Image (cartoon, rainbow, N blue to C red):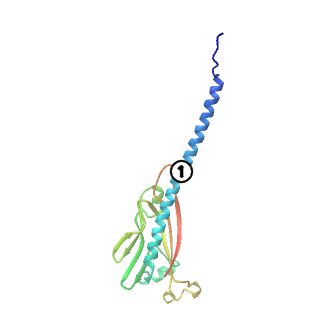
Amino acid sequence: MKKTLKWFTLIEISIAIALMGMLLVSVFRSYNTIATIAARIEQEKILNNEILFLSQALDTETQWRTVDFSQYAQQDLVASNWYSADLFLTWGDGAIHIFAQGSGCNALSFWSGNGSCAIMMDKNGQITALTNPDLLFIKGLSFKIIPYRENLPDIVSLKDWYKPGFWIFWDFSIKRFGTNWSSNVSLSVQDFYSL
């Protein structure tokens, strides 16, 4: 007696190929999602390290210091509601100036992908970068000076007097320009330093 071999039909083979294709698409999408999440986590880690470094540097440098009001035009500070793009601190013979420096420290340069901007500190003539311009793009930096009572001009009422110090406001983003904008990370930070 002759045995005949039973083969798969064309429909069965088509169904198996379609199921394998759907499984591969599902695996690829999961891998792509995991890769995007991993890239975003890495960028957030970079941002957190930069924030931590800047905060520690400001904490260290603002201890025992006061705002150097001789560097500001008093009426300009009052007119701007005590906001400034620069921070001047002094103590004894030492002076500190914190500012944004670079080509294109604005949002337009950020969106075009051009420019390099960093937060810098000039301490007695020695300039140090507080942020890495190769990793971060600073879109904005400002300070709100909270004055000491003796530095208040007559037009500022005592109800506006708070604990002296300054607020720092900065907007920044990871400096990676790719096609996948969903993985790019931006952040706005505000912090108060008491003097």
Identify which residue is drawn at 47% across, 79% down.
76
Front-lying residue, 120 or 105: 120
Identify which residue is drawn at 58% across, 41% down.
27
Identify which residue is drawn at 64% across, 14% down.
4
Residue 173 in the image: state x and y as whole percent. Answer: 49, 60
Residue, far top: 1
Residue 23 in the image: state x and y as whole percent. Answer: 61, 38
Residue picked out by circle 1: 36
**The N terminus appears in which quarter of the rendering?**
top right
Mark 1, other Cα within 10 Å: few <14 / some 14–19 / many ≥20: some
The total number of labels drawn is 1
**Rendered view: 39 above or below 70:** above
Front-lying residue, 73 or 194: 194
**Rendered view: 154 above or below 46:** below
Looking at the rendered structure, the kind of residue marked 1 is Thr
Identify which residue is drawn at 63% across, 17% down.
5
**Rendered view: 44 above or below 164:** above
Per the image, label 1 sits on a secondary structure element best described as helix
Residue 38 in the image: state x and y as whole percent. Answer: 52, 53
Residue 190 horizontal side relative to residue 71, left or right: right
Residue, far front: 1
Residue 102 visible in the shown view: yes
Residue 107 visible in the shown view: no
Residue 164 in the image: state x and y as whole percent. Answer: 51, 83
**Rendered view: 104 above or below 165:** above
